[in-house]
Image: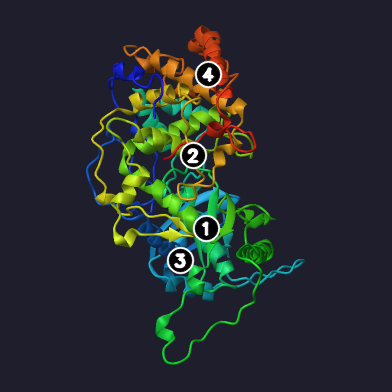
Amino acid sequence: MAARGVGFLTRLPVCSQRRNRIPRSFSRHLSCPGTIAASVGSEEQPSAVAETGIEDKTLQKKFSEVQKERREQAQRTVLIHCPNNINEKKFLKYLSQHGPVNNHFFYESFGLFAVVEFCQKDSINSLQNGTHTPTQSTEAAIPFKSRFLNLRLKNPSSQVSAQPFVRTTNQSPPSSKKLFELLSYAESIEEQLNTLLQAFQLTEENVRLRHLTCSLIEDIAAAYFPSCVIRPFGSSVNTFGKLGCDLDMFLDLDETGKLDVHKNTGNFLMEFKVKNVPSERIATQKILSVIGECLDNFGPGCVGVQKILNARCPLVRFSHQASGFQCDLTANNSIALKSSELLYIYGSLDSRVRALVFSVRCWARAHSLTSSIPGAWITNFSLTVMVIFFLQRRSPPILPTLDSLKSIADAEDRCILEGNNCTFIQDVNKIQPSGNTETLELLIKEFFEYFGNFAFNKNSINIRQNPFETSLNISKNVSQNQLQKFVELARDSAWILEQEDKNQPFSSSRQPWGLAALLLPPGSGHTSLSRQKKKKPMSEKVKGLLASIKSNSPDRSTDTSGKRTISTQA
């Protein structure tokens, strides 16, 4: 695929590192007293410290292994609503009566909460056996015994902690003011991208809380389907999730329908008596409807339950008040989980991938190219695949294509889901690392240059809802105006980065520079010099580009509804 001007920025000199690294006090602390460090291969990847993205080769766990460990970890964990004046030492001593505590941390949502992981699952049974259902004087309590507990002090005056507050972990992304402050301490554009990644990526505690939330919802669904599993997918597990992102989960009933050959020997075959419905979609709608009712009526902390059953993919949407997550629950969505695994692999292969994705997403949100409200906007998923495609087009490639991952797959990697070939290598350690040594600073410049000058009238970029269901394309909703806005902003951003004075000591300037300059929202009062100097000529170029798009054959760049598609094969 050809694109105009791709090689232009490769001739620019690379900004050298200056002064010291960012102060340690601004690094994110991933653990608090009593917690353990993140395990190797967890959703939160090691920070990107190598300038070229090439890191020491260490064995990484498979996606399926990580998810299995996280689920088992969550099953040994309880969520406890605590009084604000709790004494941490006495709290842990009390819980230790039921078994050794492996890990714990506190956070604030609608009150103070503690996530406590025991070493053994039996400890939870012991704790629940000593827990009672509260009595209300004016209201009736539904006696649902879950792992979401409430702690009260018998003698509050004697339980006051020596310190005013326990230490809590942050579950929210930094404010714009804090982000610009962090970026101002960086000494290069490359360091800015890594700083942004560290500020926005999911912390170890946040990942644990997401898996625990899924496990708590699984307890409710298991009342009807004892062998079911609630699996998180998407941003929560693919290494590209940021603090505050929604929690996508699906009800996996595959285990319920599997035949246990060891229990069916001899001349007879025993089957469950079930109720039949006309289609699998109707069955999914009925199942989600019932679980939605359970969440609404019996689920502690589940509020704002909406049953959106007529969507292409039926779902139940609700807020889990204790964790603060906005949750979407679907059913039998294994392909979405497989797509999450593919992104997990791409995010694990090279440290530059996630840093670039996070920065591009943040840039897009700052300029309203993406939105949490459905509409004609480009999605975060689309942007992620655009970055992946761009990195596959480098010379040499930084990321392998999906076809390459399929070609080195083993027999155990073979996967067919709903008639779709979802086969690719699952072991990251068997993938040959890239020999590309381009810096993040160069890559982000080239990204904006590449897509700011992409010949949409000659080429297409297919961005699929997932790489396996090729008939689905979520970019078909992107309007012509949004495409024009994206192209203009990409070109402007490439120009801004090109004009950076490499010899100026950035930290002495009060004006935002580098990545910070790209993140300035419209109307911020800090109009970029580049926008003043080139706004008119650049607009004329974009108008010419869009005019050529309109005159092009519609079957290459528009769908049946006439809407613009941004489409490429990743």
Marks 3 and 4, the one that precedes in the sequence: 3
- The quadrant in which residue 525 appears is top right
Q: Nearer the viewer, residue 153 or 17?
A: 17
Q: Residues within 10 Å of mark 4 (few under 14, many from 20)?
A: some
Q: Residues within 10 Å of mark 3 (few under 14, many from 20)?
A: many
Q: Which quarter of the rendered picture does the C terminus lie within? A: top left
The residue lying at 32 percent from left, 31 percent from top is: 394
Mark toward the start of the polypeptide (2 vs 3)? 3
Q: What colour scheme governs how the chains and residues are painted in the rendered image of this protein? A: rainbow
**Residue in the picture at 36% in, 12% down:** 501
Which comes before the other along the chain, label 1 or label 2? 1
Amino acid under disc 3: Gln
**Residue farthest along the top direction in this orientation:** 533
Along the line of sight, which residue is nearer the eye, 36 or 188? 188
User: From the viewer's perspective, is the residue at label 1 or at label 2 nearer?
Assistant: 2
Measure the C-alpha gap from mark 3 to mark 4: 55 Å
Mark 4, residue position: 545
Q: Secondary structure at mark 2?
A: loop
Residue named by callout 2 = 463
Name the quarter where the N terminus is drawn: top left
Left or right position of 188 against 331: left
Q: Which residue is mark 3?
A: 75
Which residue occupies 48% across, 11% down?
Answer: 530
Q: Earlier in the sequence, mark 1 or mark 3?
A: 3
The answer for how far apart the CA atoms under marks 2 and 3 are is: 36 Å
Labels 1, 3: front one: 1
